[in-house]
Image (cartoon, coloured by chain):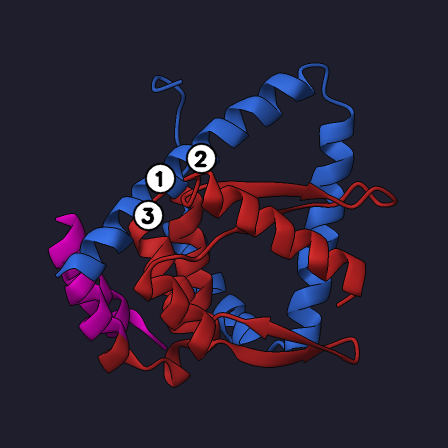
Chain colours: A red, B blue
Amino acid sequence: MDKTLRQALIDAVRFLESNGLRSCILPLRHQVTGVTIDLAIGVSGFERQIIYRATDVKISNRLFSVATAEDILLMKLMAGRSRDKQDIEGIVIAQGAHLDWDYCRTVARQLQDASGIDLVPQVIELQSKRI
Amino acid sequence: MTFAPKHDWTLYEEQVSPIEKERIAAQTDQKRFETYIDYFDTLREAKRGLVDREALDSANWKEKLAQREKLIKIFLAMDAF
């Protein structure tokens, strides 16, 4: 990553954290292309775990750190919007045979206890549908 | 539009679903990335032509923030367990 951009991001995160805005998302826009991305600050243990578990994926000869399919699936289950459900379906189709379902069930149980959302039955149903 | 007649897609789904699943499962990361870029560009172009684009962006942003706050509360509750 470009050093200036890296320092700008570090400064932005420090500013948000020092102002108690730990749950905020920082919207960024690339001036040349107009492409926007959202920088979400991962402060919780679960988010740090997602970052730690992320794997490098090579696309167009560049390495990108990408959250695992299991973690994305769990995040989308919690979000629960219709487009998230479509994404989940795609993840299960593309990754179903390789997904770590034990991990999904274990973390879904923890998230369920914290949120009150019935996540474990959804994971079990997805697992039963996998190809 | 609840009064509108709805087409039964069951037969189509039965015929196409296995082929579609096979196609998605066989894609490489590079191919998925290219497909995503294609969708992204199409949506970006479509948004440029919208009259009320700012209102849409504003509504999307509010939804995103609400979603983020909901998730953060769950994650912090999870940490407290």
Chain letter of the residue carrying label 2: B
Q: Tag 1's secondary structure?
A: helix
In this rendering, the answer to whether A108 lies above or below A118 is: below
Q: Are marks 3 and 1 in contact (CB under 8 Å)?
A: yes
Number of other residues with Cα within 10 Å of mark 1, as a class: few under 14, some 14 to 19, many 20 or more: some
Q: Tag 3's secondary structure?
A: helix
Task: Please tell me if label 1 and label 2 are on a single chain.
Answer: yes
Residue A68 visible from this viewpoint: no
- The structure residue drawn at horizontal position 35% and vertical position 17%, both measured from the top left corner, is B3
Can you give x and y, in whole percent of width and height, for residue B58 in the image?
57, 23
Q: Nearer the viewer, residue B43 or A2?
A: A2
Number of other residues with Cα within 10 Å of mark 3, as a class: few under 14, some 14 to 19, many 20 or more: many
Give the labeled residue for mark 1: B69
Can you give x and y, in whole percent of width and height, for residue A105 in the image?
20, 72
Label 1 is placed on what type of residue?
Glu
Can you give x and y, in whole percent of width and height, for residue A68 in the image?
45, 74
Give the labeled residue for mark 3: B72
Please check the rendered image and state whether residue A130 is part of the magenta-colored stretch, yes or no: yes
Is A90 situated left or right of A125 in this image?
right
Calculate the distance from the C-alpha at mark 3 to the C-alpha at mark 1. 5 Å
Identify the mark nearer the N-term, 2 or 3.
Answer: 2
In this rendering, the answer to whether A4 lies above or below A28 is: below
The stretch of residues the image draws in magenta is A104-131
Is B31 situated left or right of A56 in this image?
right
Chain letter of the residue carrying label 1: B
Label 3 is placed on what type of residue?
Ile
Q: Are marks 2 and 3 in contact (CB under 8 Å)?
A: no
Q: Are marks 1 and 2 in contact (CB under 8 Å)?
A: yes
Q: Quadrant of residue A33?
A: top right
Q: Nearer the viewer, residue A12 or A110?
A: A12
Task: Please tell me if label 2 and label 3 are on a single chain.
Answer: yes
